[in-house]
Image (spheres, grey):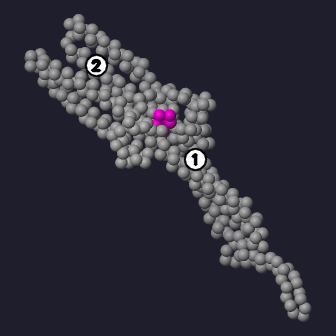
Amino acid sequence: MQEFVQALQRPTRASAADNRLRVVAADAVVAALDVISEVQERYVDAQSSAALVPLLEERLGLVERLVTTSQARLDAGEGTRSDLVTLQAQRVELQVSIDRARLDERTSRLRLARLIGEPSTAATWALELWTAPALLRGSERDWTDTALAARPEIQALAWKLQALGDEAALVRFLPWEGANFGLEAQSGQGWQVGPSLAAPLPIFDSGDARRAALTAEQLEARHELTLAKRRVVEEVRVAYEGLAASTANLGRIERELIPLQRQRRQLAEDAYRAGQTDVTPLFLAEQDLRVAQTQAIEVEAQAARALVRLQRAVGGPGVAERLADAGSAAPPSMQLAADRVVPLPNKP
């Protein structure tokens, strides 16, 4: 009888075990995606900091030349102490910014070293050249639908619900656990043979408590699944809007701000060469051009981080790449973090 009951339970038990195994596998995928996303963001941080340092140093050199010029004009009785002090304060601020950018780059490298399993290495890899992500294509709905179908967090909860359903189905066999059925022979006034059945009486445990517990777990899992889906939709929408806004802002800076600053610098240089102004307007125009270029790098970094978060929100770089190949997302050049960050460049 026990073997017969176990045979009836075997498919359901196997299904429950398979679903539990799928839940564990999905959790492992979630951990791997988190590590990949963190590596990508740290690599972007290191790249942006490394790209900012030369521009900040050029700005510092321009400010130092402005300080020298302002000091000379003040000594000649043509300048003011206020202009000199303002430029000196700006020079100190730039020095602080350079130190902060270098520290950010070093910190990002050390975090990368820990993430790739080499926390004690020198972390002096040669970073690849900076490449801004391309414009975002595809609708927000496409990314959201793909995320709802591919996110391992949602799949894990769905498999958990199936496992709980299998376990609930096993509860109906609870009264038959410990039952025996067979033939029994007795000798008295001759042999007597007949069927025998022994079954436990569900006086204290009829399975209601177990069924109630499984029902509560199923309700909890359903609520967790709903919450997970809502969080996925929120993450995709926030990352999508962030990437769209960053790329639009980056295009505005590259197409409008930087050309205008270059034009302004050229006009200031022409006026200086013609003897119409002194060198100060030329230095200021040159500095504003460097500021615009610095803003472009910062916005590029924001766009790259938004892309990494969008890829994580949709289910990983692989899912995002398939979505792009299908024509619903960005072109291959947009796969900044997926193609450049993993694997990391070799040590020099």
Amino acid identity at mark 2: Glu
Q: Main secondary structure of the magenta part?
A: helix
Outermost residue to the bottom: 189
Q: How many marks?
A: 2
Name the residue: 36% across, 27% down: 295
Outermost residue to the right: 190
Amino acid identity at mark 1: Pro
Please state, as top left, top right, bottom left or bottom right, where the C terminus lies in the image: top left
Q: Residues within 10 Å of mark 1 (few under 14, many from 20)?
A: many
The residue singled out by tag 2 in the image is: 286
Q: Can see residue 5?
A: yes
Q: Nearer the viewer, residue 2 or 206?
A: 2
The residue singled out by tag 1 in the image is: 152
Outermost residue to the front: 348
Name the residue: 44% across, 23% down: 251
Residue 56 quadrant: top left
Q: Is residue 244 magenta?
A: no
Q: Position of residue 285 (x, y in %)?
A: 28, 18
Q: Are marks 2 and 1 in contact (CB under 8 Å)?
A: no
Q: Position of residue 249 (x, y in %)?
A: 43, 26
Name the residue: 51% across, 45% down: 33
What span is in magenta?
337-342
